[in-house]
Image (cartoon, rainbow, N blue to C red):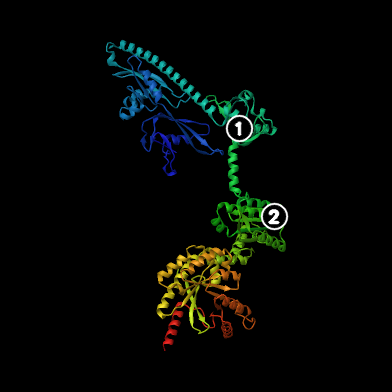
Amino acid sequence: MNYQNGKAQPVADSALQYKGDRYYFSEGMKLAKGEIYISPLDLNVENNQIETPEKSVIRFIIPLFNENNEKKGILILDYLAQNLLNQIKSDSNNTMGMETLLLNENGYYLINDGKTFLSINDDAKNISFGEEQPDFWKSIQNNESGYFEDDKNIFCFASIYPLDGYHNIRWILVEYVPMSGLSIFNNEANQKIITISVLLTFVFLFVSLVAAWLLMQKKEASEREKLTDNIFKNSKEGMIIMDAQTRIIYVNPAFSLIIGYSEEEVLGRKPSEFKKDKRLELLYNMIRNAVNDYGSWQGEILDQRKDGTTYPRYLTVSKVFDSKSKELINYLEVFEDLTSAKMIEATIDKIKNYDEITGLPTQMLFEQKMKDLIKQYDNITLIILQITNFDTLYDNLGKTFGAEIIKEVTNRIKAFLNEEDLIGKFHRDQFIVARVNSSEKLELEHFLDKLLCFLQESIDISGKKSYLNISIGVAMFQEHSADIEKLIGFANIAKNYAIQTGDNTYVYYEKEIKHNYLKNLKLETELRSALKKNELSLNYQPQITTGTEEIVGMEALLRWNNDELGRVGPDQFIPVAEKTELIIPIGIWVLEEAIKQNKKWSELTKRRLVVAVNLSPVQFKNDDLHEVIKQLLNKYDLPPELLEVEVTEGILVKNIDSIKSKLDKIEALGVKVSIDDFGTGYSSLKYLQRLNFDKLKIDREFIKDYPEKDNGSIAKMIIGLANQIGLKVLAEGVETREQFIFLKENRCDEIQGYYFYKPMTVSDFEKMIIDEKMQKKQ
C-alpha cells in the first residue's frame, strides 16, 4: 500500500514508495525486541518532496519479528503534532508583552514570532536559532534552564520533554523581551530588576505552559482510552484482559457472544477454571507456561463453550508490561471463532476433492486413498474407464442428460465392486477403479467382460435411449509399478491405446503397448500438419467394365508420405484421422483434388470418367456436407454425375434416418452414391431398399480365394441380389483371370484390381489415359 493524496492506495510491488533512505528507518532497524524509537518533530517527505498539505509529524517506530524471532520490518506510527504546537502558541499570546520561541534539540524553530513549524518552513529563512545566536545556543545545549542577554534582548529558557518518559525528545522554551521596550531602566541596577522581573515572568509562563501541557496530555489520554474501549467493545474477536495472576479483569461483548459466559460469571476467575474438560484445563496451563517462558503464544485449539459444545478458535496470548517499571501487569488474550472459516474450508475441500455430480473422490483424494490401500493389500489392479462418445452425447442431448448418464454409469460400476474396492472420477467422462485381490487374470477378465457388457446396455433417460462406447486400460500394482502416479500413467496409456484400436474393449498395459501408443501419438502429431506441409496425395485405380474391358471410372485413394515416418499406410493413419476428426478437413481436400483432377482429365481426353471418393462416417457430422460438394462441383464446373461417393455399411447402423437424409441431399445434386465393402459389416436388405444406392461394391474378401479355397457362392449371391433390385455391381480386389471370368459370367458389371491396373500416381494415370486415347485414334 502507498499513502497518496490523503488516502491509502494499493499498488504493484514495483510502485511501492521506498522508505529505506529515511533516517528513522535506519534507526528503527537497530531496535531490539520490545524497544521503541521516537523521532524528532519533522515534516513528512514523500518522493523527495515535502507532502502537501504539510504535516508536523513525530514518528513512533516499533520493530516487527516473526515466530522465529527474525526481524522482518518496522511499524511506523505518525503522530500529527500540530495540535500541540497550536496550544503552546496560544498560551504564549497571554504573557506580558514577552515573545515566545520553541526550539527543537538541533536549534531549529518550532515556534518563532507567533509562527509555528509549518509556516516557518514555508519561509525557508530564519529557521535556526542556533545559527542566529551561537553563543546563547551553546549555553542552552549545556544547561536545562537559564537566561542570557545581548545588546538587544533578554532571554530566559527552560527544557521541556513533550513525551513523558522519553528524554531523547527535548524541546527548549525561550521567552525574551526587547531592551528597547525597557529604556527607563538604563542603569545596571535597573537592568538587574529587569532581569529578575523577566525571570519571574518566565517562571510563571513556564508553569502555565506545563499546566496546559498536562491538561492536554490528560485530554489525549482520555480520548485514547475511549478509542481503546470502542475497539474492544466493537471487535468481532473475543478479548480477555487478566491481571498478573491470570485472573480475568475484563472481557468484551464478543467473548460472551462466542463462549456463552457473561462478564459477571468470569470476572476474578482464571480461564482454566471454567473449562469442563480436564484436557482443556491442562492445555491452558501449558499455554500459560509457554507465555511465561517466551512472552507470547499463538495457535489453533479446539475449545469448549458454556453449553459444552466444542468449536475451533485461533488464540493469541501476550504479556503486558508497565512502560516505566517494566513489571508484568497484565495478560492479553485475543481469540477468533473459526467455525465459519472451517465450514468454508470444508466446502472448498469438498469441491476440490469430490466430484460434484457423483460425490466420488477426484484424482488428488483418490491417490491419497490409494496410498492407504496399498498398505493393506498386495494385489491391486488399477482400471481406468472412459466413455469415449460422451462429448457427442453431451453436445446433442444437453447438460442435464449428460449428468444423468454419469450418475447411471457410476451406479453400474459400483454394482460390480466389492466393499474394499476404491472408485474415483478423474475427468467428466473418465472413472478409475482400484480392484483389490485381483491377481488371477482369468477372474479379472471375467470381471471386465461383465462390466463392459453391462455398461454397453442402453441407458433410458426421459424416454431417450443412448448407447455408450467404453474404452478401458488396466495396470497391475507391483507387476507394472509400485509407484501410484506411474501406475495411473500406465493405465492411461493402456486406455488410450484401447481408444486407438477401437471402442468397447480393454487393454492391459505392456511395454509394447506403450511403444505402440507413443508411435500412434507421433503419427497423430505429424498428421495434424500433413495438409500444411503438402504431404498428402491421391492415387487413382481404374475401374473396368466387364463387357468391353474399357476404363469407365477410377477410385481416388489417399496416400501420405512423411519426412520422418516415411510412407504411412491408409490402414494406419485413416483411423487416427477419424478419431481426431482430422478426417473432416482432409476429406474436403480429397473431394476437391479428385473433382479438380477429373475435370482436367475430362477436358484432356473428352471422356466422361466417374471418379469415386470414400466418405468417412465422421464427415457425416457436418450437416452441410452436401453444400460443400455442391460448391466444389460448381467451382470446377464438373458435371455431378461424374462424381461418386462411397459409404460403408457400418455407417448405416447408427442413426440411419439422419444418414438417409444427408445422402438424399447429395443424390439430389446428381451425384452417384455407392455402398462400399458390402458383406463385411451389417448386411441387410432393409438398408438397400430404404437408401437409393446406384452401385454395390463387393469386398475383396469374397473374391481373393477363388477358385482355390472359395467356390464364389457368396459373391454370386450378392451379385444376384443386386441385379434383382436394379443395382450395378463392382467387385474389388480382382487379381487373376479366373476371378475376372467368374465375375463376368455371373453378370458383375465392373471390376477393380491388380488384374488390370494397380493404383497409379496422378502423372502415371494421366499418361495411361492419354496413351489409350492415342491408340484408339490409330
Q: Which mark is residue 759?
A: none
**Which circle's residue, 1 or 2, is located before the other in the chain?**
1
The C terminus, quarter of image: bottom left
Mark 1 residue type: Val
Q: Is residue 494 above or below residue 610?
A: above
User: What is the spatial separation of the Cα atoms under label 1 and label 2, in whole angstroms?
Assistant: 54 Å
Q: Quadrant of residue 240?
A: top right
Q: Position of residue 208 (x, y in %)?
A: 41, 16
Between 673 and 495, which is closer to the camera in this rendering?
Answer: 673
Question: Which element is circle 2 on?
Answer: loop
Q: Quadrant of residue 719?
A: bottom right
Mark 2 residue type: Leu
Q: Is residue 726 above or below residue 506?
A: below
Q: Residue furthest bottom?
A: 778
Q: Position of residue 221 (x, y in %)?
A: 48, 22
Instruction: Say which residue label 2 marks.
Output: 417
Q: Position of residue 290 (x, y in %)?
A: 62, 33
Q: Is residue 115 left or right of residue 338?
A: left
Instruction: Say which residue label 1 marks.
Output: 291
Estimate how packed mark 1 is, as few (under 14), some (14 to 19) or many (20 or more) residues with alpha carbons within 10 Å. Answer: some
The N terminus, quarter of image: top left
Q: Position of residue 483 (x, y in %)?
A: 64, 57
